[in-house]
Amino acid sequence: MRNLIDILDLDVREIDALIARANDIIERPDAYREICRYKKLATLFFEPSTRTRLSFEAAMLELGGQVLGFSEAASSSSAKGESVSDTVRVVSCYADVIAMRHPKEGAPLVASMAASVPIINAGDGGHNHPTQTLTDLLTISREKGRLDHLTVGLCGDLKFGRTVHSLISALSRYEGVRFVLISPEELRLPDYIKQDILEEKGLEYLETESLEEVMPELDILYMTRVQRERFFNEEDYLRLRDSYILTPDKLSTAKSDLSVMHPLPRVNEISTAVDADPRACYFRQALNGKYIRMALILALLGL
Ligand code: NCD
């Protein structure tokens, strides 16, 4: 039995296989409609979500399986003080695979030690979000035709943004990827990621506060939301939330084949006027999230 807690739990070959499976699902959806019949996915969401939970549920339903779960901690027994370990031990009796989101870093790892079915980390605090990264990798490979030799700009809240942390881990394994880290001073990428991944592997990266300056060199611009729920005080959030707002005007110096990505939800950081630009791929990215989760569920169930 396998879990997906950190994106590095999957090697590059396994990621390639998931991407290939997702592409096959996109091309031949009918071949997959019954494949998870009588299988159940539980979604245990102790933190808010739209895309991740619903795309997991849609994924399982499209595979012919069934779903159960809860979407807020208040409606589960954690409100009575039950531990995560006990909760997943019990849910293991009711489901074949569990997707779990939790505000505490490491909670899905703890859960995986107590569960008797595979656990998927659907986001743990400001730490990791491996299934968003699979979504991002499928999107990059479909938009760009490759995962290597890319200049990737990551912009916004690089400190608390878990999607950025997992994406950097994943992309650090492909040749010729250059990272451009665009954030205000206070929301820079944590040192542990810089040291353990970028410096350890001798990867090329640049830190800057200016999106305008680096725009022309980017192949991918990955925008992120300032993570309000992880701030200690509201004033800091209010001061930093509009640090970057992508507009059609700012895109005028970008490459014609730039891919603008965003894990969503967006707040202010991409003007809605950008949505009509063919380079905006965040809604295609959200759709890809369903297909790659279908591929992941199949892999964890051995189907
Ligand atoms: C992200 C998350 O939950 O970390 N959302 C998502 O899963 N697509 C990004 C965010 O909330 O800003």
Image (cartoon, rainbow, N blue to C red):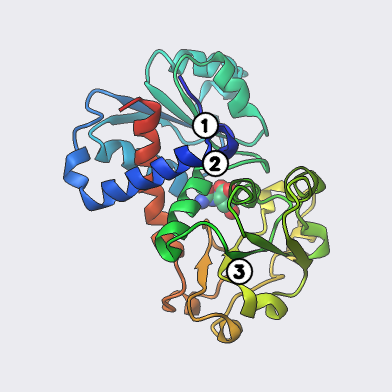
Viewer-nearest residue: 17 or 50: 17
Q: What residue type is labelled 2?
A: Pro
Residue sitting at x 74%, y 75% = 210
Please say if the residues under marks 1 and 3 sit with CB atoms less than 8 Å apart.
no
In the image as oriented, which residue stretches furthest toward the left?
30
Measured Cα–Cα span from mark 3 to mark 2 = 23 Å
Q: Is residue 56 above or below residue 241?
A: above
Picture quadrant where residue 180 is located: bottom right
First reached walking from the N terminus: tag 1 or tag 2: 1
**Where is mark 1, residue-wise?**
4
**Where is mark 2, residue-wise?**
130
Measured Cα–Cα span from mark 1 to mark 2 = 7 Å
Q: Measured from the top left, where is residue 252 in percent x and y?
A: 56, 87
Residue 137 as seen in the image, left or right of residue 221? left
Quadrant of the frame with the N terminus: top left
Q: Measured from the top left, where is residue 57 in percent x and y?
A: 35, 39
**Where is mark 3, residue-wise?**
269
Quadrant of the frame with the C terminus: top left
First reached walking from the N terminus: tag 3 or tag 2: 2
Q: What residue type is labelled 1?
A: Leu
Q: Measured from the top left, where is residue 48 in percent x and y?
A: 53, 43
Residue 243 as seen in the image, left or right of residue 1? right
